Image (cartoon, grey):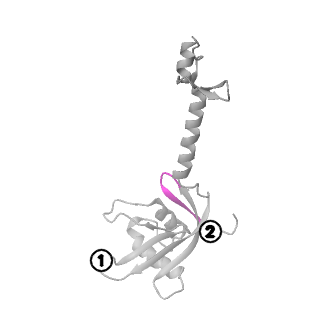
Amino acid sequence: MADGMSMMERLEKTGSMLPKGVAYAVSYGLNGLRMVTYAELKQKRIERQRQHQDWVRPPILPKRRAGYVWTFFVPGPFYGGWWAYLRTLEGDEKLEVDRFGRGWKEPALRQAMELFPCGLPPTPENFTLWAEAFAHEHRRPGRFRRQGLAKVWLKRDGRSGWLVEKYDNVS
């Protein structure tokens, strides 16, 4: 390219047009041309997007993991009352009923109340009584007296959050 012409100008001057489906030509070696097709450009773009999505997207979680249903009592006027959480290695997730009586906020809490009935039907109105009975039946050793802990299997459901299953040692 000592004459200052680009490869495309040289192709047009000689009357050669690029074949259909070729995006551009690249100088390859002394006298060779490498034709880059639209399909190659698309494949590179798709691979670049896939690498970016793998970097951005969180890792796929295991299908089933061990966790705990944890209930505890907090004294005081502001945050006082019974609380329920699902505890996993990744963190804790609060389980609660709608305070205005419209039903369940978390399907996992209803499932936990069904797995550990403690003599009460699993309804949102019975949450406080259930949490107290659960803490009594599944007492967690520690400095706080009013808390309960029970092992469960957890599965992540994309639509409704966690699915809670009874813990057994068979995987």
* Left or right of residue 168, residue 46 in this image: left
Q: Nearer the viewer, mark 2 or mark 1?
A: 1
Q: Which quadrant, please, contains the N terminus?
A: top right
Question: Mark 1 falls on what kind of element?
Answer: loop
Q: Quadrant of the C terminus?
A: bottom right
Q: Is residue 161 magenta?
A: yes
Q: Residue at x 54, y 57 (%)?
A: 156
Q: SS class of the residue under badge 2?
A: loop
Answer whether labels 2 and 1 touch (C-beta < 8 Å).
Answer: no
> Residue drawn 33% across and 76% down?
79
- Label number found at residue 78: 1
Check if residue 120 falls in the magenta segment: no
Which is more N-terminal, label 1 or label 2?
Answer: 1
The reply, left or right, for residue 139 in relation to residue 28 is left
The front one of 74 and 97 is 74
Query: 40 or 46, which lies in front?
Result: 40
Residue type at the position of mark 1? Phe
Q: Position of residue 83 (x, y in %)?
A: 41, 73
- Eyeballing the image, is 169 above or below 22? below
Mark 1 burial class by Cα count in 10 Å: few <14, some 14-19, many 20+: few
Q: Position of residue 135 (x, y in %)?
A: 49, 79
Name the main secondary structure of what is drawn in magenta: strand
Residue at x-position 55% and y-position 68%: 88
Residue type pointed to by label 2 = Tyr
The Cα–Cα distance between marks 2 and 1, rounded to whole angstroms, is: 34 Å
Where residue 76 appears, as percent x and y from the top left, is 32, 82
Q: Position of residue 62 (x, y in %)?
A: 61, 58
- For disc 2, the marked residue is 167
Q: Please provide the residue range marked out in magenta.
A: 157-167
* Residue placed furthest toward the front: 2
